[in-house]
Image (cartoon, grey):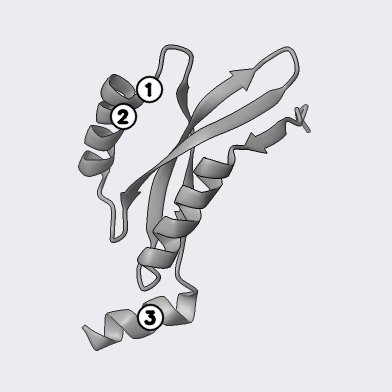
């Protein structure tokens, strides 16, 4: 019982392509990356301007924290922020078969 604020999501073609290429290149692994862009409060738009592929295996908390800190200090432009993450996860049965074969 809360207020749900809807936002319009706009994804730049380059960001969309980077997410897909990451997932295609490492199709046998779970892929995780960061979405970079801007939030426009007045128009309730979220602009995804870039994607930064991070991991294509298990991600650990410490590694994620370092990656986020590096992105914030080195990659972001003045008006950008980390606005989300993306994940391309293996189907459950494929992940189980992969673990059994190792």
Residue shown at the point (52%, 27%) measured from the top left: 37
Query: Label 1 belongs to which residue?
Result: 76
* Closer to the camera in the image, 79 or 32: 79
* Quadrant in the picture for the C terminus: bottom left
Front of the two marks 2 and 3: 2
Q: Earlier in the sequence, mark 1 or mark 2?
A: 2
Does residue 32 sit above or below 8 in this rendering?
A: below
Circle on res. 8: none
Q: Earlier in the sequence, mark 2 or mark 3?
A: 2
Distance from label 3 to label 1 (Cα)? 37 Å
**Is residue 39 placed above or below 36 in the rendered structure?**
above
Is the C-beta separation of discs 2 and 3 under 8 Å? no
Which residue is under mark 3? 96
Between disc 3 and disc 1, the foreground one is 1
**Residue 81, x across and y down, in percent:** 45, 22
SS class of the residue under badge 3?
helix
Q: Residue at x 45, y 49 (%)?
A: 18
Instruction: State the image coordinates of residue 70 (x, y, percent, origin top left).
Output: 25, 29
Which numbered disc, 3 or 1, marks the residue that appears first in the sequence?
Answer: 1
Q: CA distance from mark 2 to mark 3?
A: 32 Å
Q: Is residue 29 left or right of residue 40?
A: left
Residue visible at 39% across and 51% down in the picture: 32
Q: Position of residue 31 (x, y in %)?
A: 39, 58
User: What residue sits 43% from the left and 61% below the top?
Assistant: 23
Element carrying mark 1: loop
Labels 1 and 2 touching (C-beta < 8 A): yes
Q: Which residue is mark 2?
A: 71
């Amino acid at each position: 019982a809360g207020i749900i604020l809807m936002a319009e999501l706009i994804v730049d073609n380059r960001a969309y392509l980077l997410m897909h290429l990451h997932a295609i290149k490492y199709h046998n692994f779970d892929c995780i990356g960061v979405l970079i862009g801007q939030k426009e409060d007045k128009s309730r738009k979220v602009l995804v301007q870039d994607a930064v592929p991070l991991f294509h295996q298990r991600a650990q908390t410490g590694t994620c924290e370092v990656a986020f800190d590096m992105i914030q200090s080195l990659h972001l432009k003045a008006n950008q922020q980390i606005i989300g993450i993306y994940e391309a996860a293996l189907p459950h049965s494929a992940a189980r078969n992969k673990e059994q074969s190792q």
